[in-house]
Amino acid sequence: MKNINICPRNQTEVEWASGILGCSSDVYGNNQYMCLPNAEKTSLVQFCVDGLMEMKEEGNCLSVFEGNLITESCKHFLFGCPDKPWRSHEFYKYPACQAINIRDKCYRLDPSCPTGYDKNNETILDVSEIKDPNVVIYSVLGAMIVLLVTIIVFLLWERHKLKKDFTNQEEKQDITELLEEQIGFLGNNGCQNGGSTFFSGDEKKKNNITVIIQ
């Protein structure tokens, strides 16, 4: 086993590190390279597994003690704990299981693990490098809520605008109909008086109608 500061973070880095150590593949073609914390959480170690790369249960991380793999529960982690059964050769998909505090000898995402800067810890995987899968979900939901609210506000504004335009149109229609009735009434009176309508000065003033349509 060989101590290392940072474990591989993807398949390409795993293959490169495996080549340096000279690791082989099991009978199913799975790379036998692994990089895990030691049981004391004082260092990360890389090594080649002698045997099958087995499936591991969800809610567990792996560490190594004297060449033996040890299963440790991580269900209490803040995030990053495997949420489904996983293959041991795909350890790199769960960086929370390799993020350790070598000063206080604990997993960094364990709520009971002390936090703070430690110059002896700076080469170990930092928590900020571990992505919380819930962040993506929260971001998408937030964007959808903002979009939905925007659409609702726009529709309400359009409805108010249409209602206002319709009300104004009705008012104009009522005024037009009233004028037509008054003009028709005056016209009928004129016809009944021989086709001409004569008004005295006072009557002209009384019946003078000025209409302003806005």
Image (tube, helix red, strand yellow):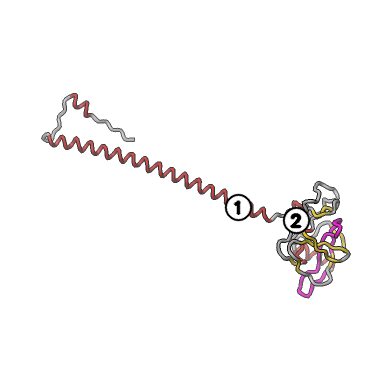
Q: Main secondary structure of the magenta part?
A: loop
Above or below for 172 versus 36:
above
Residue at 75% x, 60% y: name it.
94
Which badge, 1 or 2, is on the more N-terminal residue?
A: 2
Reading the image, the residue beneath label 1 is 141
| Amino acid at dot 1 | Leu
Tag 1 secondary structure: helix
Could you say which quadrant of the image residue 83 lies in? bottom right
Residue at 79% x, 51% y: name it.
112
Of the pair 172 and 19, the residue shown nearer to us: 172
Find the magenta span and give its range.
23-46
In the rendered image, residue 49, in percent from the top left (x then y), is placed at: 83, 69
Reading the image, the residue beneath label 2 is 76
Q: Closer to us: mark 1 or mark 2? A: 2
Residue at 75% x, 55% y: name it.
77
Above or below for 196 versus 98:
above
Quarter of the image for the N terminus: give it.
bottom right
Picture mark count: 2
* Distance Cα–Cα, label 1 vs label 2: 25 Å
